[in-house]
Amino acid sequence: MTQVRLLDSIFTRLVAWSIAVCIVVVLVLGALVGAKFEQLSTATQEAAVNADVTTLSEAYRDDGVTGLARRINERLAFSGPAGSAPHYLLVDNDGAIITGNLSGWPAGFEVGTEPESIALPNGTRVHARGLLLAEGRLFVGRESSLDQMILNEIGFAFVAGGLFVVFAVGVAGRLTTARLSRRVDRVIQAFQNPDEKRLEQLAKDRNAEDEIGELTRRTSETLNRLNHLVDSQRETTDLIAHEMRTPLMHLDSRILKSLKTAPDDATAQGLSEARSDIRGVITMLESLLDISHSEAHRGDPRGLHPVDLSDLLEHVAEIYEGSAEETGHHFEWDIAPGVTFLGEEMQLTRLVTNLLDNAFKYVPTGGTVILSLAEGPVITVSDTGPGIPPEDRDAIFDRFRRAKGNDGSSGGSGLGLALARAIARRHGLDIRLKPTMRGATFVVGGKKPEDVEPA
């Protein structure tokens, strides 16, 4: 069975899309949470700075610069959490430092009514606001690195949580899709080889109420109906063959009796020709039925069993060796040992004999016919005859296609190569005419024995 590549599987794509959606959702949520946290952090920092400015302004109104300086020193005496420490600077109108924990007024920082984010000379980011006093200026700032660390922790938590979600979705998706894939595989196998074993496996999913369960029910019903139709067709053709063959054989027997009592040579000749025609009709009927049987069972492993092709072809070669001596042909064979194949022994024998009969029929006396078998299996029948005319090569395997033999006649039913191709395809093989400079070479090959599943 042809296996669907992992990357081409619909189920793999579903899992991949699920994982992709999870990643996008985690990233979007992380971005939204990060943006919201940063917004809240900025608002909180600005509110704290404004509150400090208001409190210190009240201290200045109550006690002047001395009271303001004392309040600033009291606040600096208490150490806050790392990353959220306050920064103060009180300078007089000449820029001299009165108190604070900064070495100087930040460059470019102007007194304003709203806090802003700036970088101190040491690189620390703060939210700060400047206040203009009658006797100088006041700088109030608060570090924001703690909030940045919290934001980084939140980001790390989202990454870890996102990886866990992606992993969980991947595992759950893989387990689910593996089960669905097995169910679909049973349907595919049943289509490829609708034997009883696979139809029984297909019945396991018939009661499922999902889409695959519905597909399984319809598939099971269709394949059972097709098997019934194939069996009915085979029974019908067998019955037709029997009903037609029997009266023809009776007619042949009557002609044979009449031939023995023929009053003259002309009558005997006519009866003999009629008898040959009847036998030709019987042979053609049997060939047509065999072709129909092979085509109806194409791809069906029922009835296939391990066949020792090497042994089979050696027996065929021994038989044709004696015939070749009588007809004045040279017959050679090269058969690899130990080649086995799953097939029907009688049909494979007929496939090879049809090709050999065709070769001996069209190769003049003194010509050579070669039979070979190689691993694969690959069966080759070649000859040194006149070959196939270019205009006939495309239709050489059509039914009722005749070519002239060594005697100039176009005898035969024209079904030999058509039957050979039907038998080859029934076994998962193919037959082709190989281009050659001389004679004709037919090659039968295809799947290896292990690629064909037995019934």
Image (cartoon, helix red, strand yellow):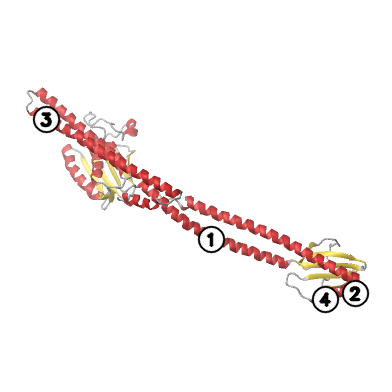
Comes first in the chain, label 1 or label 2: 2
User: Which sits in the foreground, 223 or 100?
Assistant: 223
Q: Determine contact: label 2, label 3, CB under 8 Å.
A: no
Comes first in the chain, label 4 or label 3: 4
Badge 4 crowding class, 10 Å Cα cut-off, few under 14, some 14 to 19, many 20 or more, is: few
Query: Please, what is the three-letter code of the amino acid marked with disc 4?
Result: Glu
- Vertical relation: 27 (above or below) 285: below
- Vertical relation: 283 (above or below) 347: above
CA gap, disc 1 and disc 4: 53 Å
User: Which sits in the foreground, 310 or 370?
Assistant: 310
Q: Is residue 66 visible?
A: yes
Marker disc for residue 66: 2
The secondary structure type at the circle numbered 4 is: helix
Indicate the position of residue 344 as horizontal and vertical percent values.
26, 46
- Vertical relation: 347 (above or below) 7: above
Query: Please, what is the three-letter code of the amino acid marked with disc 1?
Result: Phe
Query: Please, what is the three-letter code of the amino acid marked with disc 3?
Result: Arg
| Residue 125 as seen in the image, left or right of residue 380 | right
The residue wearing badge 1 is 167
Badge 3 crowding class, 10 Å Cα cut-off, few under 14, some 14 to 19, many 20 or more, is: few
User: Which sits in the foreground, 384 or 94?
Assistant: 94
Marker disc for residue 254: 3
- Please give the name of the residue rendered at 74% of the width and 66% of the height, measured from the top-left corner: 144
- Please give the name of the residue rendered at 28% of the width and 40% of the height, measured from the top-left corner: 232
